[in-house]
Image: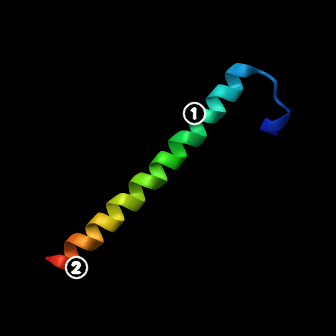
Amino acid sequence: MLKSITNEHILALARKHRQAGIQFIAYLVIVLVGATAYFTLA
C-alpha cells in the first residue's frame, strides 16, 4: 500500500521506520552473538 503513496512526509516516515527496524534486528544479533561468545569463553 505504501508503494502507491506520493506524500513525501509519509514516505520519509516509512523509511525511518524501516531503518529503525533494521537497526533493532542488528542490535539483537550483536547482543546474542556477544553473549554467546562471552559464555562460551567464560
Q: Which residue is drawn at 17% across and 77% down?
A: 41
Q: Which residue is drawn at 21% across and 75% down?
A: 39
Judge from the rendering whether residue 37 lies leftward or rightward of residue 10; answer left or right. Answer: left
Q: Which residue is drawn at 78% across and 36% down?
A: 2
Marks 1 and 2, Cα distance to the nearest angstrom? 36 Å
Q: Mark 1 points at which residue?
A: 16
Q: Which amino acid does label 1 sit on?
A: Lys
Secondary structure at numbered mark 1:
helix
**Which labelled disc corresponds to residue 25?**
none
Categorize mark 2 by other alpha carbons within 10 Å: few (<14), some (14-19), many (20+). Answer: few
Q: How is the image coloured?
A: rainbow
Image x and y of residue 14, in percent: 65, 34
Farthest left residue?
Answer: 42
Compare marks 1 and 2 and give the one earlier in the sequence: 1
Q: Residue at x 82, y 40 (%)?
A: 1
Q: Name the residue under label 2.
A: 40
Question: Which quadrant is home to the C terminus?
Answer: bottom left
Image x and y of residue 26, in percent: 45, 54
For residue 33, above or below residue 1: below
